[in-house]
Image (tube, grey):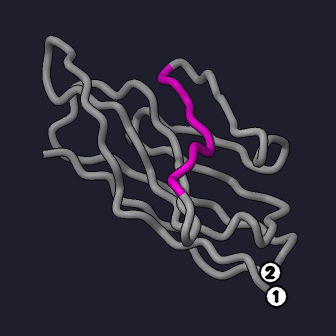
Amino acid sequence: QVQLVESGGGLVQPGGSLRLSCAASGSIYRINVMGWYRQAPGKQREFVAHITNDGTTNYADSVKGRFTISRDNARNTVYCQMNSLKPADTAVYYCNAVISERAPARYKNYWGQGTQVTVSS
């Protein structure tokens, strides 16, 4: 059984920063892509950023230059440093990871429970 546990959400003023963390635990053989999605009230879940196991990153246009994704492969953990936050960034942020539980690698998609980020003065 694989679990993704997020932390680091909260309330921040516009222009502020937060750092999200997501740790994968359980039966893990190999992790491919790790990333973040978000869902604002009344909107569909949308892609934020992801990072492959060789460190290649990809960002949504709305967060480029403000968010930085990174990962610690030894700890099966992905991070999202969010700077210059705007009210439009308010959402529940979900961790996502593509994980194989055993060899030979057969990957499945896993989600965390979500962490609330609120940007407001």
Please give the count of numbered marks on the rendered protein. 2
Kindly identify the amino acid type of the residue bearing the numbered disc 1.
Ser
Residue designated by label 2? 13
Disc 1 to disc 2: CB gap under 8 Å: yes
Of residues 111 and 26, the one drawn nearer to the viewer in this rendering: 111
Kindly identify the amino acid type of the residue bearing the numbered disc 2.
Gln
Residue 25 in the image: state x and y as whole percent: 25, 47
Q: Earlier in the sequence, mark 1 or mark 2?
A: 2
Q: Which residues are magenta?
A: 44-53
Mark 1 and mark 2: Cα distance apart in space: 5 Å
Q: Residue at x 72, y 57 (%)?
A: 82
- Figure check: 93 above or below 47: below
Q: Residue at x 44, y 45 (%)?
A: 77
Q: Residue at x 79, y 59 (%)?
A: 83
Q: Main secondary structure of the magenta part?
A: strand
The residue positioned farthest toward the top in the image shown: 104
Residue 19 in the image: state x and y as whole percent: 63, 61
Residue 11 in the image: state x and y as whole percent: 65, 82
Q: Quadrant of the N terminus?
A: top left
Mark 2 neighbour density, 10 Å: few (under 14) some (14–19) many (20 or more): some
Q: Quadrant of the C terminus?
A: bottom right
Residue 11 shown left or right of residue 112 in the figure: right
Residue designated by label 1? 121
Of residues 59 and 1, the one drawn nearer to the viewer in this rendering: 59
Of residues 103 and 94, the one drawn nearer to the viewer in this rendering: 94
Q: Is residue 41 magenta?
A: no
